[in-house]
Amino acid sequence: MAENSFQQLAEIAQQINETRSTNAKISSCSQYFRSLDGQDLNLAAQFLGEGAFPSISGKRATVGSRTYSTCAADFCEIDYEKVFKPCKTALGSASEAIEKLMNNIEAARKKREPAQLSLREIESIYEDIHNVSSRADKQQILRNAWKQMTPIEIKFFIRIMTRGSLRIGFETKSVVAALAKAFRKELDEVRYAHMITGSIGKTAVLCKQDNLDKARFKLFHPLSFMLASPIESRALDNLDGYISEEKFDGMRAQAHVSEQQVELYSRDLNNITHSFPEIVQFFLKKDLPDVVLDGEICVYKNHEILPFQLLQKRMGRKKPDKDIMDKYPVLFITYDLIYHDERPIFEKKLEERRNLLTKLSRTHDLPITNQFEVEDRDHLDELFERALAHGNEGLMLKKINSTYEYGQRRKSWLKVKKPGGTLDTVMMYAHAGSGKRGGYYSDFTLGIRVAEDERYEEEYIPIGKAYAGYTDEEMKRLNDRIKELTVEKYGPTLGLIPEIVIELEFDDIQENKRTKANYSLRLPRFKAIRWDLSPEDADTLKDVERMYQQKIDRERLKQEKNPSFYIEQTDPETSTG
């Protein structure tokens, strides 16, 4: 195996995937990083932690699932509908299916002559993909690249290309920990350098060169967001030191503003500026100093915050037309300030950041959240019910003396939400777990009934995947039952006779035209394993459609009285122009 080859990276990724202990995963990766220098180290950290391109580059190797899947079916000389799609469904992963097909189909093996491509050659291939636009051109580049790769390289090449999770139980925070261990640095120093440079690859090189102190922040690269920990009920042991804000039914976003430039970033650090031109224009008119604002983009019309499902109609559009903008007007509501006076202000207490934000709001007419001191548990209940009446998701509780804990999910911010609903679903597939759950089937594809639905020929179709909400004892009992119900096995995935009924709790229902149901669930998790129910008791697609429409149609308390946000001098409904 050539030193610093992509094959080596793929094998390290596979080794990490097959390792249960988080510390052992970090140790394996740290040893790998120590063996690298310069651009190879930069690229290895980038591929494992960010994807084909650095997050701050704004570049994407935009290849859709159907594009690379049909290309793989053609490469393997198999029927896409009859062979590839069933394999993908059973394995729960297109890249996993492609790896197994490339390994087992003779026609695919004959076409490949692995060339031990270097990390820089892989970088060049991603650049070639980025520079073409047609499906045919992208597929030609993929075919030429795959001819030089092993199946495991192809699998991780696809996962890195699509900038999704590598699905090895090793996310960016683990890459940061591996860099700290590899080069004997303090974890917080590495985290901070990664935060302000916006590049895990640059951070890796700074670690190797002992230059972490030279990391500098520049506007217009997204910063990792501070995250909130969910709490199961509104019961808290101690409410002292918390303030309350309503949790909006919108899209978390970051606004970077400097003179005549404004850029917006989503929580997954993607640039979404093009989808919301009126927000850009709003900020441009305000003559703000250089700032980074943390807030929420909401559809706001007739003094009402409208449901997230309507915001989805604005997302992903390169340039929304006037009709869409008129029908679904948006507003950026700020709740935190994280860059001010030419530097990040993470270390300032929430109370200090809030005072600075309030001054900005008063001098520049910015919509900002209303905050309430929580008097007692009854007051908390009152605030929670008002948030729901506004159509919002619940409450955020924030410690007044907390710093901005970028990229962390701790107890300084708490989110108190009411579940969006529950559905009785049927377990269709069981997927093998990793890490601490290795040896068990712990990830599950759940379905709803369509047996009486004239639109479908099947009895059940998938509605969501869940891997949380059950105990270890329940997982063991499930695995015993799964063995009895298995009818198909494709690598780490089992196809099951639909007998096990799961009451599934979720935050919301969203339209998703890429799924068979045309809907997907937001944050689905087990509420209960309903051993007492039969599959005929499962909810139907028409139940899902009804619940979705009820959310859209529900009446909402207008923001004119007891609003969840305010602006000092301008009506927030008209402030976007």
Image (cartoon, helix red, strand yellow):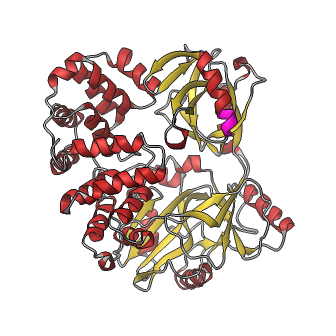
Q: Is residue 336 above or below residue 163?
A: below
Q: State the image coordinates of residue 424 (x, y, percent, origin top left).
A: 70, 29
Relative side of 79 to 107, left or right: right
Q: State the image coordinates of residue 322 (x, y, percent, origin top left).
A: 44, 53
Q: State the image coordinates of residue 448 (x, y, percent, origin top left).
A: 63, 25
Q: Is residue 274 above or below residue 526?
A: below
The answer to whether residue 349 shows anywhere in this view is yes
**Secondary structure character of the magenta stretch overall:** helix
Total tally of numbered discs in the picture = 0
Q: State the image coordinates of residue 104 (x, y, percent, origin top left).
A: 28, 20
Relative side of 191 to 485, left or right: left
The answer to whether residue 273 shows anywhere in this view is no
Closer to us: 562 or 269: 269
Which residue is depicted at the point 20% across and 22% down? 109
- For residue 249: magenta? no
Q: Residue furthest right?
A: 378
Relative side of 524 to 320, left or right: right
**Residue 481: quadrant of the picture:** top right
Which residue is depicted at the point 13% across and 29% down? 113
Closer to us: 255 or 95: 95
Which residue is depicted at the point 73% across and 19% down? 534
User: In the rendered structure, which segment of residues is drawn in magenta?
Assistant: 470-475
